[in-house]
Amino acid sequence: MAYAIRVHKTGGPEALQYEEVSVGAPGAGEVKLKQHAIGLNYIDVYLRTGLYPQPTSPFIPGMEGAGEVIAVGSGVTDLKVGDRVSYAGPAGGYATERLIAADRVVKMPDGIDYKTAAAMMLQGMTVRYLVRKTYKVGPGTVCLWHAAAGGVGLIASQWVKHLGGTLIGTAGGPEKCKLALANGAAHCIDYKSENFVERVKQITGGKLCDVVYDSIGKDTFPASLDCLKPLGLFVTFGNASGPIEAMNPGILAAKGSLYMTRPSLAAYTSSRADLVETANDLFDVVSKGAVKIQVNHTYALKDAAQAHRDLEARKTTGSIVLLP
């Protein structure tokens, strides 16, 4: 018997309904997975509320997971029943079993368990493209990273340090700042009690940052732009406080001929080769211990609504995993 969380009508956490579902056999180019762990991410909130509309209704949210292949469709040659695999996207993860295109999953190294893999695929591959592709972080790079105590932020703090860069984080409260600092952030600004623009100026001696990574959106814009040196890059990759409203591009000129991008993991891993390269780079830094994945919260799949409430209330740190 298979079960899933489905959304019949977008809305609050109560829209997440735990139901029995029929999964069926994999079609051509697909595999069927028995899921062992499912990652929970802020993008799941955007799916649930309708900010990111889905093509079908009802739909199953959830963009990442890890499990074993239990059936293989025609035309699939590089995966077999029993393989341990993980993925980030497409939606459909909040389920005990699911069908997924074979070219969207990657084989997991032996040393990484299901819970760790489910917690790191979307967040870890997001950090990978942000620090290795969107802006090539290296020795001497100074970046500002909002929500440094979240799942993405904790991975980023470690990875930026591993690459020789300096990460200035922001977080809400002293405990979250301690967590970011313990994971490699060079500095952490408590946005609840400090003005992050002024603190960035102090920390950098007025030199400001090469790049700002902003997953908060409305609440941190346009102040984030004031943390950038001339020709700096503003990377907006999330909307935790709501989307940035219509902006006049002239603001980029006024604040120093800044660059701005709105990247997505889907675009950076659209080809099979890019997906495998991104995943393998992530597996490598985790296997080496350069990046440690912190699964700080686990919930039963049926309790996904409570997990969403806690995430939106900013009660969580690190990664969150749902267990079927």
Image (cartoon, helix red, strand yellow):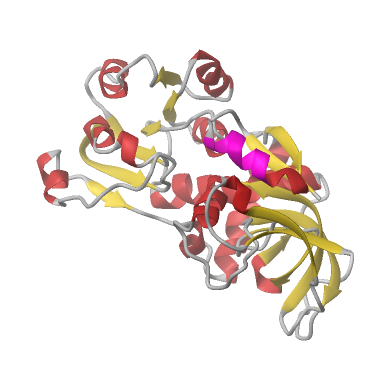
Q: Which residues are magenta?
A: 305-312
- The quarter of the picture where residue 67 lies is bottom right
**Residue 140 visible in rendering:** yes
Residue 196, position as x, y percentages in the image: 32, 22
> Would residue 252 be found to the left or right of residue 98 on screen?
left
Residue 86, position as x, y percentages in the image: 72, 57
Residue 11, position as x, y percentages in the image: 52, 53
**Residue 83 visible in rendering:** no
Instruction: Give the residue drawn at x 14%, y 44%.
Output: 251
Q: Is residue 136 above or below residue 156?
A: below
Q: Is residue 123 above or below residue 20?
A: above
Closest to the observer, 49 or 296: 49
Residue 310: in magenta span: yes
> Would residue 71 be found to the left or right of residue 124 on screen?
right
Instruction: Give the residue drawn at x 35%, y 46%.
Output: 235
Q: Is residue 228 above or below residue 305?
A: above
Closest to the observer, 179 or 99: 99
Q: Quadrant of the N terminus?
A: bottom right
Please name the predominant secondary structure of the magenta segment in the image: helix
Residue 115: in magenta span: no
